[in-house]
Structure formats: C-alpha cells, structure tokens
Amino acid sequence: MTLFLNTPEAVVLPGGVLGTGPSTTYSRPLMPSSPSVQELAVPSVLGMPQQPALQLLEDFGFATTVVQVPGQGKEGEVYGQQPRPDDIVRRGSLVRVFVITGPDAEEAKLAQIAAGIDDLKESVSGLRDSMGKLVDLVQGAAAADGDAPVAKSGPADGGKQAKA
C-alpha cells in the first residue's frame, strides 16, 4: 500500500496519482521509513511530466531510464512504465519510463512491448540460474546421503549415471 501526503486540496489524477490544483502539481507519496525494506510497490507515474516522474521513482530508490517514443498526447508526458504501477520489485530495480515525443501511437506501443520482452528474457535467464543452483544443491545433499548419482550423465559416458 502506498501512503500519500494528507492535504485537503488533494485530487486523484489519471493513473491514481494524487495532485493539487492543475495537473502539473503533484504531492509525493510518503517513503518507506526503513532502508531495510527491500521490496516495494512501484508508484504510478502515468500521465506525469518526465522530470517529476523520474524524481518520484528515484526518491523511492529505483534506477530509471527514459525511452522516448512517438505517440499521441502531451509531449514530455509519461505514456507508460515498466514494471507496471503497483508491481512489487526490489529496491534499486530499473524502471523504464516511456515519454511521448511526437505523433505515432503505434510505434510507442511497439517500443513498450519490446522493453517488456527484454524484461521477460532477463527473468527467464535468472530463473535458469536459480534452477541450476537448486539442482546442484539437491544433488549435493543427496550425494552426501549416498542416495543419488555422484556424476552427471553426459555424452562421454553414453548417458549412464555412476552411483556412489
């Protein structure tokens, strides 16, 4: 849950961002009080101007990068973000901010999809690494008990496994 500053004039803007007065003034969400908090919900910066959006994300401890994309809407406005608002990620994670630079909504969507695919590839790679470590750990524990193969099968041994 994200807590926001309590101001009587606060209004909800597109993307669930609290603001005051015209849509160019925003109140900031309160920061988690403890630096030991390692996983946070990504705040929504959709519809915000680029600089306040980047500052908000950096205040939360996220790394940021701007992807400028042609699109319909107000130039310099945040069109999209990856990870999405309210996704839970580690402090220091990279948040991509997609900022409108001109009129071509189709290209803007494609750039956002491409960035999502890159994130998915990174996640799959991390999963493979974790699974490899888990397999090694299980094999090591089983070998210590004398219940499992102590050598991995491979092309040199014809696919046969040696037992302890």
Image (spheres, grey):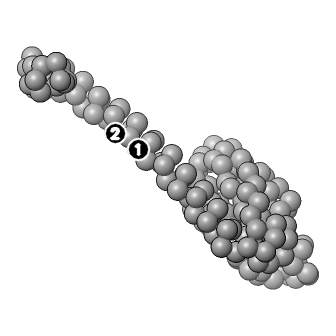
Query: How dense is the environment of label 1, judged by Cα within 10 Å: few (below 14), some, or many (20 and up)?
Result: few
Tag 2–tag 1 contact (CB < 8 Å): yes
Which residue in the protein does label 2 denote?
A: 131
Mark identifier at residue 82: none
Judging depth in this view, the residue of 152 and 105 nearest the camera is 105
Q: Residue at x 64, y 62 (%)?
A: 111
The image quadrant where one finds the N terminus is: bottom right
Q: CA distance from mark 2 to mark 1?
A: 6 Å
Q: Amino acid at mark 1?
A: Leu
Q: Quadrant of residue 46?
A: bottom right
**Residue 92 at x, y = what percent?**
66, 45
Measured along the vertical axis of the image, is residue 149 above or below residue 88? Answer: above
Q: Residue at x 80, y 56 (%)?
A: 54
Residue 143 visible in image = no
Which residue in the protein does label 1 denote?
A: 127
Residue 80 visible in image = yes
